[in-house]
């Protein structure tokens, strides 16, 4: 199978590097001849090291050297079986790429996008043959995380889903197949948690740093506010605009309003830029005071609130048959960085505690996202 990746940024390069470990032919498309020379030299040096250390035989080394091409020429995609676009999260850029390559690749070539926040139907709307279009959402860091979302559109044919699934399995990845209604579901669930964490911050009992500290000590690997600043506010806002529906509108609104303000005032986050943390440090709030016991209880409660909204949302997805229970349960733990999976959380906490927590939030905020669902669908 001949696989191509478009985009030499961190994700594109990592996706290419991962597949390059396995058998096949590979093409990496980048923008400048300087990139071509640098990346070609990098891959050649990697292979030479593997040869010198005995990881490759002379024959295997020669085959590997012939198996890849780094190029700026889209015509080099002509005989590819799969093309994965992994460039900046910009709708127009992605649309232009697929319009350009559709007339170059063969009719059975699968067209895939690694988008994490843009609706697939918008990316592929100008493609003439939409049945071969699909989402392949990899997660950072590619070499460690095994889950890859296979996001299908209403037009995607099953035969192309099967080809992508088999390729991922051979590449030691765990494919998570998702219907259109559940596209990029892990990004959506992260947005739910970020939005709930911001609502907690607005209660003015804990600072952003303190909330992240509590969550990292009790629930997740990375603080939710750390993720906001690392990802970039514009990506979070775009996710909200693309994922919004009546179910999530009220939950998403507070952080969306704040995010718009941050962008306007130059606190957009992302690599090397000031974000939400810097803004709040420079514009400090006056926090409500709690005694030591009450503060301890509050910290325990915010962990429970995030666990509850996560578990309830998973029940919603399974009840509506948007996702498969076991695969989604494991993917949530891995990709969102939880110390245990949601079903194990439910077993440890018990249904009554989760439902009581949700009802308390519902009474306070009158948002139906907190209405408890039938948690027995999780098999607890």
Image (cartoon, rainbow, N blue to C red):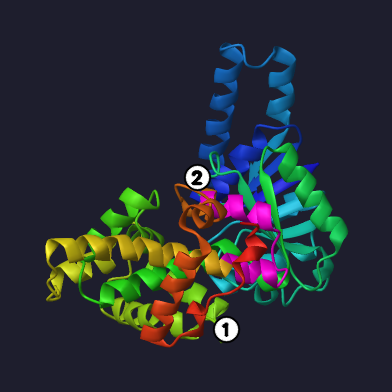
Residue at x 54% of width, y 25% of height:
45
- 124 to the left or right of 349: right
Residue at x 61% of width, y 15% of height:
51
Magenta residues: mostly which secondary structure?
helix
Task: Find out whether the residues at labels 1 and 2 contact each other: C-beta distance under 8 Å.
Answer: no
Dot 1 or dot 2, earlier in sequence: 2
Is 315 placed above or below 161 here?
Answer: below
Residue of label 2: 141
Q: Which residues are magenta?
A: 314-333
- Foreground residue among 98 and 113: 113
- Residue 268: x and y in percent read 33, 70
Report if residue 32 is visible in the image: no
Is 273 placed above or below 155 here?
Answer: above
Residue at x 44% of width, y 80% of height:
251
Report if residue 145 is visible in the image: yes
Secondary structure type for disc 1: loop
Displayed quadrant of residue 276: bottom left
- Foreground residue among 342 and 144: 342
Residue of label 1: 245
- Foreground residue among 80 and 291: 291
Displayed quadrant of residue 110: bottom right
Secondary structure type for disc 2: loop
């Amino acid at each position: 199978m001949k696989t191509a990746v478009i985009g030499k940024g961190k994700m594109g390069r990592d996706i290419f590097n991962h597949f390059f470990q396995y058998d096949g032919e590979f093409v990496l498309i980048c923008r400048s001849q300087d990139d071509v020379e640098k990346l070609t030299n990098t891959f050649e040096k990697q292979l030479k090291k593997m040869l010198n250390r005995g990881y490759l035989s002379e024959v295997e080394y020669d085959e590997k050297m012939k198996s890849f091409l780094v190029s700026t020429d889209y015509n080099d995609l002509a005989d590819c079986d799969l093309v994965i676009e992994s460039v900046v999260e910009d709708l127009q850029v992605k649309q232009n790429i697929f319009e350009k390559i559709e007339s170059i690749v063969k009719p059975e070539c699968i067209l895939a996008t690694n988008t994490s926040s843009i609706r697939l139907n918008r990316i592929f709307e100008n493609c003439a043959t939409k049945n071969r279009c699909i989402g392949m959402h990899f997660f950072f860091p590619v070499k460690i995380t095994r889950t890859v979302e296979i996001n299908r559109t209403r037009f995607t044919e099953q035969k192309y889903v099967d080809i992508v699934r088999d390729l991922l399995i051979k590449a030691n990845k765990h494919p998570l197949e998702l219907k259109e209604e559940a596209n990029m579901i892990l990004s959506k669930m992260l947005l739910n948690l970020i939005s709930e964490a911001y609502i907690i911050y607005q209660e003015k009992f804990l600072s952003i740093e303190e909330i992240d500290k509590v969550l990292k000590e009790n629930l997740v690997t990375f603080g939710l506010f750390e993720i906001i600043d690392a990802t970039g506010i514009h990506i979070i806002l775009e996710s909200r605009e693309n994922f919004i529906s009546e179910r999530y509108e009220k939950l998403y609104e507070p952080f969306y309003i704040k995010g718009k303000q941050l962008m306007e005032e130059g606190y957009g986050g992302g690599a090397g830029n000031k974000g939400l943390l810097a803004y709040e440090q420079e514009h400090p709030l006056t926090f409500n005071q709690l005694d030591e016991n009450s503060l301890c209880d509050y910290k325990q409660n915010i962990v429970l609130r995030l666990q509850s909204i996560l578990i309830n949302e998973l029940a919603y997805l399974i009840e509506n048959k948007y996702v498969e229970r076991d695969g989604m349960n494991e993917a949530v733990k891995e990709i969102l960085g939880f110390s245990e999976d949601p079903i194990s959380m439910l077993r440890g906490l018990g249904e009554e505690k989760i439902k009581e927590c949700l009802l308390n939030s519902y009474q306070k905020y009158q948002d139906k996202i907190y209405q408890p669902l039938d948690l027995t669908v999780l098999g607890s």
